[in-house]
Image (spheres, grey):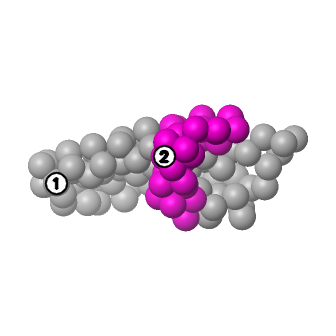
Amino acid sequence: MMAMTDLFVIPLLAMAFYNLIPWPIAQIIVNTVHAYVIIIIVWAVLSWFRVRSSGANNLYQFLDKIVSPYVNIFKKIMPATGGIDFSPLIAILLLQVIVQLVIRL
């Protein structure tokens, strides 16, 4: 759970580094994060189904190599609740916070 002081620190950090990142670089960061979010979503949806075709299985294994190192950080912090794994959701939310900070920089 975020402390009340954390809610004030994040905007202050954004204000302190205002215009620190040039806009074209910020756009590249934002677009890369959005692409990664889409990859996480596709990976999560593919993990719900038992994939029988080799093409889809290869796609899942490829995405798993890209997504698992990042999502596993959140799996260690927050284990599956009632059989539902919320770690991809938490991972996406953190990425969105980073995007908002970059946009404001």
Stretch of the chain drawn in magenta: 41-69
Q: Find disc 1 in the rendering and name its residue.
A: 25
Three-letter code, disc 2:
Leu
Give the residue furthest to the right. Answer: 82
Q: Position of residue 87 (x, y in %)?
A: 66, 49
Is residue 80 shown above or below 51?
below
Q: Quadrant of residue 54?
A: top right
**Residue 66 within the magenta-colored segment of the rendering:** yes
Three-letter code, disc 1:
Ile
Depth check, front residue: 71 or 19: 71
Q: Position of residue 59 (x, y in %)?
A: 48, 46
Q: Position of residue 68 (x, y in %)?
A: 57, 59
Please, what is the dominant secondary structure of the magenta stretch? helix
Label 2 sits on a secondary structure element that is: helix
Q: Position of residue 22 (x, y in %)?
A: 13, 54
Which is in the foreground here, disc 1 or disc 2? Answer: 2
Real-space CA distance between mark 1 and mark 2, rounded to the nearest whole angstrom: 30 Å
Q: Quadrant of residue 64?
A: bottom right
**Residue 64 within the magenta-colored segment of the rendering:** yes
Q: Find disc 2 in the rendering and name its residue.
A: 59
